[in-house]
Image (spheres, helix red, strand yellow):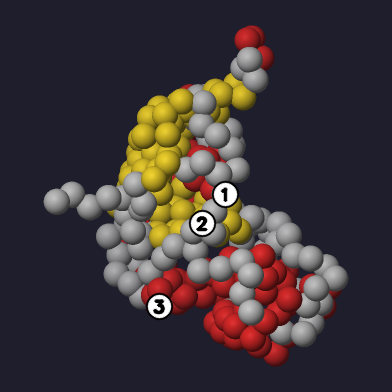
Amino acid sequence: MATIPKIHFDNVGKIFGTGPNAFIALEKLNLDIADGEIVTVVGPSGCGKSTAMNIVAGLQEATSGQCLVDGKAVRGPGPDRGVIFQQYALFPWLTVRRNVEFGLKLQGLPVAERRSRAMHYIELVGLADFADALPKMLSGGMKQRCAIARAYAVNPSVLLMDEPFGALDALTRVRLQDQLLDTWSRDRRTVMFITHDVDEAVYLAHRVIVMAARPGRLQEIIEVDLPFPRNEDIRLSPEFTEIRNRVWHAVYTRKSKAA
């Protein structure tokens, strides 16, 4: 019996506008993402990366085809999918703990249960000492960790991450990459992660999805045959370099030729 993919893009297309002003953001995207898999998505601006993720999240509707999660067509946002954007979108008047509790409160959980669950994920991302701090007291990396804890707290089976580390300094970015993989190793959630950073794409993923622009479409899928857990030795290995160069070539060399 065939295993149902966690996320299934079935000939998905997305067009913005009409007539001569129409823009094809996605064209005939067919892709399966397995349960517990980390997939990173790279490609030039305008290749439909964020559009594809927004369709999975239920924030946008496909113009053609359909997207399925656990075999069911996506009809809108749902608690089974947690979304993390580059901008942290924290409520500035709420503490870290109350920010993380927010989605649990909407779900109607009792106060004691949502506090317990929120603190579990706050500790998981290393913010226990800042649970009562307001966002203005946090660094950029700490704010992003708070956003990750908030997404995890509602217990989604899918994490959708749109360049979540893009605005951070290099050291913080590497630390959060390792923290993401450490958290994933404990719960094996499905992760779809958009990035412009080729090293990041290879380091995090089981597979790298390379998109091409005008119109946005799937160009190549590159397997990342590197062991977990990953660390600095992996980053410095010749195997990592080989895969990174292949992804770099797929994204940038072909982009230059197309231009």
Q: Nearer the viewer, mark 1 or mark 3?
A: 1
The residue beneath circle 3 is 186
Does label 1 or label 3 sit earlier along the sequence? Answer: 1
For image coordinates 56% across by 24% down, the residue present is 15
* Contact? badges 3 and 2 (CB < 8 Å): no
Crowdedness of circle 1 by 10 Å Cα count: few (<14), some, many (20+)? Answer: some
Helix, strand or loop under label 3: helix
User: In this view of the protein, which residue sits in the foreground, 57 or 206?
Assistant: 57
The residue beneath circle 1 is 77
Q: Quadrant of residue 219?
A: top left
* Contact? badges 2 and 1 (CB < 8 Å): yes
The residue beneath circle 2 is 81
Residue most extreme to the top? 20
For image coordinates 36% across by 51% down, the residue present is 70
Q: Amino acid at mark 3?
A: Arg
Q: Position of residue 76 (x, y in %)?
A: 55, 44
User: In this view of the protein, which residue sits in the foreground, 235 or 35?
Assistant: 35
User: In this view of the protein, which residue sits in the foreground, 176 or 89?
Assistant: 89
Q: Amino acid at mark 1?
A: Pro
User: In this view of the protein, which residue sits in the foreground, 241 or 2?
Assistant: 2
Q: Amino acid at mark 2?
A: Arg
Crowdedness of circle 2 by 10 Å Cα count: few (<14), some, many (20+)? Answer: many
- How far separated are the C-alphas under marks 1 and 3? 25 Å
Helix, strand or loop under label 2: strand
Q: Is residue 188 left or right of residue 44?
A: left
Does label 3 or label 2 sit earlier along the sequence? Answer: 2
Q: Quadrant of residue 123?
A: bottom right
